[in-house]
Amino acid sequence: MPDLDDAIARLKAYSDAGADCLYAPSIKTREQIEAVVKAVAPKPVNLLIGGVSEFTLSDVAALGMRRVSVGGGLARAAWGGFLRAAQGLVQGRFDGFADAAEGNELNGVFGERA
C-alpha cells in the first residue's frame, strides 16, 4: 500500500509546477482513489488498471477519475492467449485457437491497407 499522504503531497507539487494530468502509482482502493481525486481537484487524475479489477470503467469515472491506463495489460492478455495455444500444440491439440480473432475482424479494427 502506498504512503497516501506522501503521494498526495507529491501530486500537489506536480500540480503546482504545471502538470496537466496527475498519476499516483499503486492506488487501488475506492478510498485511495477518492482521496487523491479530492486532494488535487480540479486537475484530472490517471488510474492504472492493468489487470483484473473490482471496478468497471463507469465505477472509476464515478469516483472522479478522468483517465484510465491499462499499461501492459493488453499485451499480457495477448501473450496469455498465445501461451495457452502453444501449450495446447505441445499436447497435440488445436483448441487453443478457439478464441482467436478472425482475420476480417482484425482488418476491421486495424483498417485494411491497400
Image (cartoon, rainbow, N blue to C red):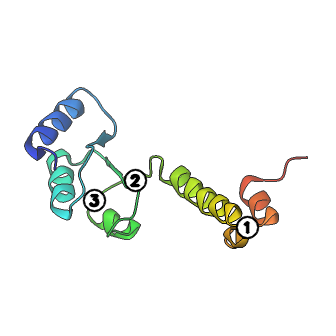
Using a 10 Å C-alpha cutoff, classify the residue at mark 3 as few (fewer than 14 neighbours), some (14 to 19) or many (20 or more): some
Q: CA distance from mark 3 to mark 2?
A: 11 Å
Q: Residue furthest top?
A: 17
State left or right for residue 98 relative to residue 22: right
Nearest the eye: 60 or 54: 54
> Outermost residue toward the right?
114
Is label 3 or label 1 in front?
A: 1
Which is more N-terminal, label 1 or label 3? 3
Q: Is residue 42 above or below residue 12?
A: below
Where is residue 94 shown, x and y percent of the image? 74, 69
Q: Image point 14% across, 48% down: which residue?
A: 39
Q: Position of residue 15 (x, y in %)?
A: 23, 34
Q: Residue furthest front?
A: 91
Residue type at mark 1?
Gly
- Measured as percent of width and height from the top left, residue 97 is found at 71, 68
Q: Nearer the viewer, mark 3 or mark 2?
A: 2
| Camera-nearest label, 1 or 2 | 1
Circle 3: element type: loop
Q: What amino acid is labelled 3 in the image?
A: Gly
Determine the secondary structure under disc 1: loop
Q: CA distance from mark 3 to mark 1?
A: 49 Å
User: Pointer 1: residues within 10 angstroms few (<14), some, or many (20+)?
Assistant: few
Which residue is drawn at the image coordinates 20% and 37% (left, top)?
11
Residue beneath disc 2: 68
**Which residue sits at x=11%, y=43%?**
3
Q: Is residue 33 left or right of residue 77?
A: left
Please give the residue where the numbered disc 1 appears in the rendered image: 92
